[in-house]
Amino acid sequence: MNEQELRKRLEALRSEHRDLDVAIDALTESGKERGFVDQLQIARLKKRRLQLKDRIAAIEDTLLPDIIA
């Protein structure tokens, strides 16, 4: 993958990560209103969000390698 493709992929992953944040917040709030929070669904979304965070970090490391001083 070239740099431009990596940057597009990075932005798509960041967007999906933000969407998951919104979904998790919405499920938590709606659950509080109903008196029942679907912990299993929230856990699945959080796991997916963490996987995305790891993939984002890997791509960022590829694009911006550490500089050894």
Image (cartoon, rainbow, N blue to C red):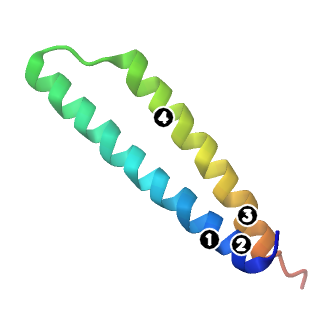
Residue 41, percent from left and from top: 40, 22
- Name the residue carrying label 3: 59
Residue at position x 36%, y 18% in the image: 39
Considering every residue shown, the one lying at the far bottom of the view is 69
Q: Earlier in the sequence, mark 3 or mark 2?
A: 2
Mark 1 and mark 2 in contact? Answer it, CB < 8 Å: yes
- Name the residue carrying label 2: 5
Residue 40, percent from left and from top: 42, 16
Q: Which of marks 4 and 1 is nearer the N terminus?
A: 1
Give the number of the mark in front: 4 or 2: 2
Q: Distance between the residues labelled 1 and 3?
A: 11 Å
Q: Earlier in the sequence, mark 4 or mark 2?
A: 2
**Residue 16 in the image: above or below residue 23:** below
Mark 4 and mark 1 in contact? Answer it, CB < 8 Å: no
- Name the residue carrying label 4: 46
Q: State which quadrant residue 48 falls in.
A: top right
Three-letter residue code for mark 4: Lys
Q: What element carries label 3?
A: helix
Three-letter residue code for mark 2: Glu
Q: Earlier in the sequence, mark 4 or mark 3?
A: 4
Q: Which of marks 1 and 3 is nearer the N terminus?
A: 1
Q: State which quadrant residue 24 falls in.
A: top left
Three-letter residue code for mark 3: Ile
Residue at position x 54%, y 61% in the image: 12
The mark found on residue 65 in the picture is none
Residue at position x 48%, y 51% in the image: 17
Q: How far apart are marks 3 and 2 (CA)?
A: 11 Å
Residue 55, percent from left and from top: 68, 52
Q: Is mark 1 on a helix, strand or loop?
A: helix
**Residue 24 in the image: above or below residue 61:** above
